């Protein structure tokens, strides 16, 4: 019986560890040939010497399990590196069908303490990195569609975060980048749909090198299991990978421009923000006094949890 991704080629960026590794292994398990990209720097802030070892180790793990994989050492935020990454997939396997953008770094700081470099570096790797690979993949798919006279199989799965949905006080750079990725995703979905390409974004929760501080206090046991009973950590990256495999498949052809939150055996489909209230001026133009009379009492009575920058995100436990 053919696997869902048999004959397809995937790129996974930042796939040397954590989420990217789990996603690359899952795509390979489902039959895809995988280009495992990673820059291999030891620091989660992007510091240290680049190393091919993390990507090569994951590619070797895939091949040892009977799959097909090659490693790519490259910085996706570098335009030329991103071009070479897409070229490697096409040169090695004859085509590119799936792009999973996962690479990222963290340089956390409160907005009043953040340096220009801390801002620029995070925006560069996350947002520009997503754009670079998307650009070259889009060029490939557009050319294929025109040459073949019809749609192709193209899948983009981008990695956003709940930090953009609900705010993250110590991560203004990261939250901004992840919000930008959602905008990039929806724009790409509209632009490439006619070529047979879909673009979706996920907001994963996973216990990885990048989130070791964030989830340090979260229990590993899923709801209903006592501490120490063993089993898969509720925040294991392996909980996220199956959704990526599905979105990469022909079965998800009708899923486009979506934002999905995923963790611990739960997938939630997010909607774009809705208008909570609307106020019209009684005259031709609002005055300060009129706005004060309308908005001040409204916000005074509105619960804090209903604000756009709500302090809480989706509950970890699910029913």
Image: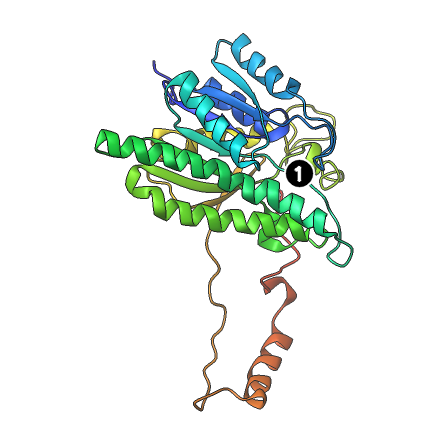
Q: Quadrant of the C terminus?
A: top right
User: Does 166 sit above or below residue 276?
Assistant: above
Residue 65: image location, x then y, percent: 52, 10
Q: Quadrant of the N terminus?
A: top left
192 left or right of 240 in image: left
User: Does 79 sit above or below residue 74?
Assistant: below
The colour scheme of the drawn protein is: rainbow
Classify mark 1: helix, strand or loop. Answer: loop
Q: Extreme right residue here?
A: 113
Residue 52: image location, x then y, percent: 64, 20
Q: Extreme front residue here?
A: 80
Q: Quadrant of residue 91?
A: top left
The residue at the point 65 percent across, 48 percent down is: 120
The residue at the point 38 percent across, 45 percent down is: 189
> Can residue 54 be seen?
yes
304 left or right of 287 in image: right
The residue at the point 37 percent across, 36 percent down is: 139
The residue at the point 67 percent across, 33 percent down is: 207
Residue 289: image location, x then y, percent: 58, 90
Q: Which residue is nearer to you in this view: 262 or 53?
A: 53
9 left or right of 287 in image: left
Q: Quadrant of residue 121?
A: top right
> Can residue 318 be seen?
no
Q: Which residue is mark 1?
A: 105
Residue 26: image location, x then y, percent: 50, 23
How many numbered circles are shown? 1
Circle 1 crowding by C-alpha within 10 Å: few under 14, some 14–19, many from 20: many
């Amino acid at each position: 019986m053919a696997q869902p991704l048999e004959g397809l080629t995937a790129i996974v960026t930042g796939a040397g560890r954590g989420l990217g590794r789990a996603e690359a292994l899952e795509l390979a398990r489902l039959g895809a040939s995988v280009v495992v990209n990673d820059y291999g720097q030891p620091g989660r802030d992007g510091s240290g010497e680049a190393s091919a070892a993390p990507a090569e180790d994951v590619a070797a793990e895939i091949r040892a399990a009977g799959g097909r994989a090659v490693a790519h050492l490259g910085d996706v935020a570098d335009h030329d590196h991103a071009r070479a990454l897409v070229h490697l997939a096409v040169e090695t396997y004859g085509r590119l069908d799936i792009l999973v953008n996962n690479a990222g770094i963290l340089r956390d700081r409160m907005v009043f303490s953040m340096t220009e470099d801390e801002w620029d570096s995070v925006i560069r790797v996350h947002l520009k990195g997503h754009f670079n690979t998307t650009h070259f993949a889009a060029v490939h798919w557009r050319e294929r569609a025109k040459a073949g006279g019809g749609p192709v199989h193209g899948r983009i799965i981008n990695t956003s975060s709940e930090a953009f949905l609900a705010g993250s006080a110590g991560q203004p750079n990261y939250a901004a980048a992840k919000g930008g990725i959602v905008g990039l995703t929806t724009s790409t979905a509209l632009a490439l749909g006619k070529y047979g390409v879909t673009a979706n974004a996920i907001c994963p929760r996973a216990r990885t090198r990048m989130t070791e501080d964030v989830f340090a206090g979260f229990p590993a046991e899923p709801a209903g299991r006592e501490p120490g009973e063993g089993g898969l950590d509720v925040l294991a990256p392996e909980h996220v990978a199956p959704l990526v495999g599905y979105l990469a498949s022909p079965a998800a052809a009708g899923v486009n421009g979506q934002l999905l939150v995923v963790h611990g055996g739960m997938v939630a489909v997010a909607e774009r923000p809705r208008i909570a209230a609307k106020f019209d001026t009684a005259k031709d133009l609002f005055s300060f006094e009129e706005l004060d009379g309308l908005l001040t009492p409204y916000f005074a009575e509105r619960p804090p949890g209903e604000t756009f920058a709500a302090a809480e995100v989706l509950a970890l436990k699910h029913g």
